[in-house]
Amino acid sequence: MSLGDPCGIGPELAAKAWTSLRDQTGLAFCVLGDAALLATQGVPVVRVADISETAAHFAKALPVLDMPLSAPVIAGKPDSLHAPHIIDWIKAGVDLCLNGRARALVTCPIAKSVLYATGFKFPGHTEYLAELCRDGDIVPTPVMMLTAKDLRVVLATIHTPLSAVPAALSIEGLVELARITHAALIHDFAIPQPRLVMAGLNPHAGEDGAIGREEIDILKPAVNQLQNESIDIHGPFPADTLFHDEARTGYDAALCLYHDQGLIPLKTLDFWGGVNITLGLPIVRTSPDHGTGFNIAGKRIARVDSLLAAIRAANDISRNRAFL
């Protein structure tokens, strides 16, 4: 587990997650971060020299691969002095997974603005992880999947202004999104015959071109191409019909075209328990579906539901991959 921004709720959540899971077999995790900071969270902490020591200590103390900060932490007050350490914690976690020493990486939230202040050039966590997984000139294409209860959504665009979404969509991009999602549902979620649906962009999925042509010019051709590749996908469907209880029984993942199209139904279904999963990488990466919580950092009121769900998802996915 990378600690994320130390001024946010990451340290509190890591401690609460250990408290919840310390008696459960198979869910032991080691934090990559500042051991002294974690020791202020009211739980016993043990510094480990190697991640292999995690399971031996987990029942009695939170294992930490100590990578100390060089500046004081003030809860709720982000500081760019911490940026190099935040980045190093993430990189160390990726390296451990790529080297086969860890089954998965769970990342606590970061604040991109803190990293940007020191020249961080990536749009966010996901893109940085993809770069760290580079193999020569080949950088994997990461796909953001969000899950809550029985709903899985993947996003064709992420933090794109709504006005720019239509121009950001392409047949090629949607086909790649669906291929990566289809493969992940088989290998990561053990679903042998995945069923996909695609949401429409416009109200009523464009109503045969009367309310926009994206469905005709981009979305339907992408669906046709995927069906010709024997991928079980249907749509585009009006987004307002895709997420009620009965509709969710008809697919394993929904391809959504912009951020709120996928996130609003997901957070309505389970506001506290959503998980962010990065598909398309050679490593398993999950994260809680919330931010750094600077406004409540240090108050000991952060809910740990999402981080616990992320840990369990990382465990399940990594075990599914192990059986390939």
Image: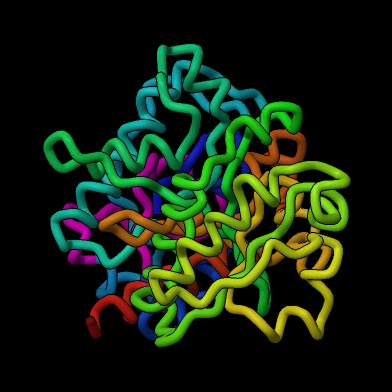
| Picture quarter with the N terminus | bottom left
Front residue of 233 and 147: 233
Say left or right for 162 vs 16. Answer: right
Q: Is residue 188 above or below residue 125?
A: below
| Picture quarter with the C terminus | bottom left
Can residue 19 be seen by looking at this rendering? Answer: yes
Magenta residues, start to end: 29-53
Query: Where is residue 200 drawn, in percent x and y?
Result: 73, 55
Identify the residue at horizontal 27%, vertical 48% (top origin).
Answer: 94
Q: Is residue 111 above or below residue 45?
A: above
Q: Is residue 231 above or below residue 294?
A: below
Identify the residue at horizontal 80%, vertical 48% (top origin).
Answer: 209
Front residue of 237 and 7: 237
Query: Where is residue 13 drawn, in percent x and y?
Result: 58, 55
Can residue 60 be seen by looking at this rendering? Answer: no
Q: How many marks?
A: 0
